[in-house]
Image: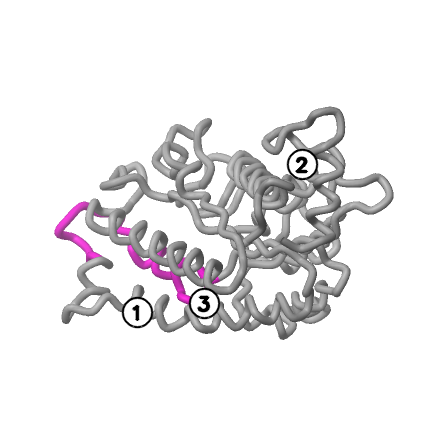
Amino acid sequence: MKTALRMALAIVLSAGGVSATAPVTTASAADPLQYVALGDSYAAAPLVPPSDPHDPACLRSLAGYPRVAAGALDAKLTDVSCSGATVGHLSTAQHPGTPPQYDALTPDTDLVSITIGGNDTDLFDEALSCVNILPEPRGTSCAKKNTAGGTDRIRSRIDAWAPVFATALDDIARRAPDAEIFVVGYGDYLRPDGCYPAQPYWKQDANYLQGAIDHLSAVLKRTAQEHGAAFVDTYTLSIGHDICAAPADRYFEGLVPSHLAAPLHPNASGARAIGNALAAAVRATSAPSGGGR
């Protein structure tokens, strides 16, 4: 357990009999948690209002999950998540005037969150390639295409990328040696068998695509555990809130959004749920009785 984060939250958890699962309203008036949010559009929540005016190229929302978590923890947030980001953009500029995301990390950083991998492994492009407006057999199954010959090409790409992510976690720990690192996984976008034609994914392709997303999250979880980071599951909390759900219940928008949000990305409700889950994970990991990582 990193000392700065543990001590700050211990103050909150011991004051007034607040339990380890109660909402954190302040970390410390004099010394708030220094929180850096890294990652891709899952964290940036593109098109969810209000937008962050400081880096418009990143399409970052001021209502993304990092803001929600920071508010719950009363943390001082530096959010450098950016739509379209890959691991390479942690160390190199993604856009002119947009510094590498690693530049936000310092030895004073107490808390880091990251969601990354969807762009590295081309999962978003694959989701678009799986769309079939017309019913079978008029079209092409992305499940069949990507598993032809007995090898799952998407899963193979994810597995090949895992060491890259492992190196990134080590780099984060080196740049922010006293920080707790939380890897936030991807959610439940498509329920079993999908909901064709409401969302234009054939049954087998809906199952295949969600299976690939689940595999990426499993790799994120395993790699996080192997490199001293915590993993935040957002799949379970989003069951029943996928793109097939009624618009009022969705955490992720479908191909035609029903809320202000990018297609196939968290909306405001989704960002709020994910942020609250991250805050709860921080509190649980950092409670005095938690025993550390």
Magenta part of the chain: 117-141
Name the residue that disc number 3 marks.
Answer: 120
**Relative to 155, residue 17 above or below:** above
Instruction: Give the residue type at disc 3.
Output: Asp
The image's colouring method is: one colour
Quick one: SS at disc 2?
Answer: helix
Q: Position of residue 254 (x, y in %)?
A: 40, 42
Judge the density around disc 2: few (<14), some (14-19), many (≥20) Cα neighbours within 10 Å.
many
Instruction: Give the residue type at disc 1.
Output: Ser
Magenta segment includes 138: yes
Dot placed on the residue nearer the N-terminal end, 1 or 2: 2
Identify the residue shown where x is 63% and y is 29%: 19
Q: Give yes or no for contact between labels 1 and 3 (Cβ–Cβ under 8 Å).
A: no
Estimate the spatial distance between the alpha carbons at disc 1 and disc 3, rounded to whole Å: 13 Å
What's the mark number on residue 72? 2
Say if residue 160 shows up in the picture: yes
Judge the density around disc 3: few (<14), some (14-19), many (≥20) Cα neighbours within 10 Å.
some
Name the residue that disc number 1 marks.
Answer: 156
Identify the residue shown where x is 68% and y is 65%: 177
Q: Main secondary structure of the magenta part?
A: loop
Magenta segment includes 54: no
Identify the residue shown where x is 34% and y is 36%: 244
Estimate the spatial distance between the alpha carbons at disc 3 and disc 2, rounded to whole Å: 30 Å
